[in-house]
Amino acid sequence: MSATDLDEEFRQIMASIHTGADLATHDALMRQLESVQKRREATAHTANGAAARKPNTEAAVVVAKAAQRALRRPRPAPRRPDPNAMPVVWGDDLRGIPNDLARTGLFNIKQSEPRRILDNEPIASLKNITMFFSGPELRVRDEDVLLQCFHFQRNLRWGDPWSVNGRDFLQAMHWSDGKRGYRDLFDSLLRLSKGHLSILRTRQVEADAPVTTAVVASNGFTEQMAKAEEDGFVLKAGRLIEIEIEHGGRGAATVITVEMNKRTNALWQTMGYTLVNWEQRLDLTSTLARFLHRFYSSHRDPFALKVETILRLTGSGTASLSKFRQLLRDALDALVKIEFLSAYWIDSADRVNVRRLHVAAIYASAPR
């Protein structure tokens, strides 16, 4: 390319720069300008042989002024994450649950016993968190319903309401879609809507109290608050869900609308979450087996727990420890059968040790 052509290209690029292009285009034009200037200088050097040539400062001035304008030009602010966005979206073969719930006794394994009405009742949990619940006692079947609510919510912003056909809700959980199934679903949704959850986090944890040790809070809400005030705390409380059920009469569809409490999104942001293998869970008929499947799903390498601790954590109504130990063996056998566990044993200290198969294990921000 001749010197004249290069000079013309140089002028055209400068004209484009002065039109005020966006930042990305401006940067590209600046690179082109520098390239053309280098070729102009090389052409002039070739034409003049080894004769000395005064440096052409025209391009340098343009580059300097353009760089100053680029610095003054406001750059787009970084996008802030949506606080109500779900932290993860999973497939139909999984169900998500916050670890703050997965590692507690909020959903007990009782079945036929009358339900108690709780009033700021301490819930079995880990040592760095104290949980209180008010409302009708919740059980493993209620957990199935809440897991399915989380599943329907996963593609939406937290707190955005969603609606679903009642039959689709029941079939997703492998519940009967007859009259009994609908009544059980309605009752469970009502219990969840009445439930009020309070989570108290202290800012300091005793050095000799690892967060992996499961305990049962023995003191009431007032006593726990008084203790927490010494070190500082964070208290979050609210209902789990709001519901609306619309039934058009015999033979008509039932539409269920659910709105998750926006404040409960904090459950997903603290100790992380776990994705539970849904088909495995549905294959388990024992409520104890389902409880253990969810609890152990939240740990990569589950730690040993005493049989008595698991008894208290599950909220079992079994009075005899030896009877519960046999029920526990049966539940663990079921977890081995579905290939969730590779092995388990109860040692001489009456501690339950398990080994997981990690083929389908999925975790996020979930400490051991």
Image: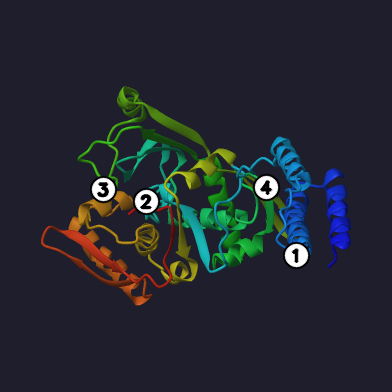
| Marks 3 & 4, CB-CB < 8 Å contact | no
Kindly identify which residue carries mark 2.
103
Would you say residue 320 is visible in this rendering?
no
Q: Secondary structure at mark 2?
A: loop
Kind of residue at badge 2: Arg
Q: CA distance from mark 3 to mark 2?
A: 10 Å
Q: Which sits in the foreground, 62 or 168?
A: 62
* Residue type at the position of mark 3: Thr
Name the residue that disc number 1 marks: 46
Q: Nearer the viewer, residue 7 or 140?
A: 7
Label placed on residue 161: 4
Spatial separation of the CA atoms under disc 1 and disc 3: 80 Å
Looking at the rendered image, the disc whose residue lies closer to the viewer, 1 or 3, is 1
State if disc 4 and disc 2 touch (CB < 8 Å): no
Crowd class of label 2 (few under 14; some 14 to 19; many from 20; radius 10 Å)? many
Q: Amino acid at mark 1?
A: Thr
Who comes first in sequence, dot 1 or dot 3? Answer: 1
Could you say whether the residue bearing mark 3 is in a helix, strand or loop?
Answer: loop
Residue at 28 percent of width and 36 percent of height: 205
* In the image, residue 193 above or below residue 112: above
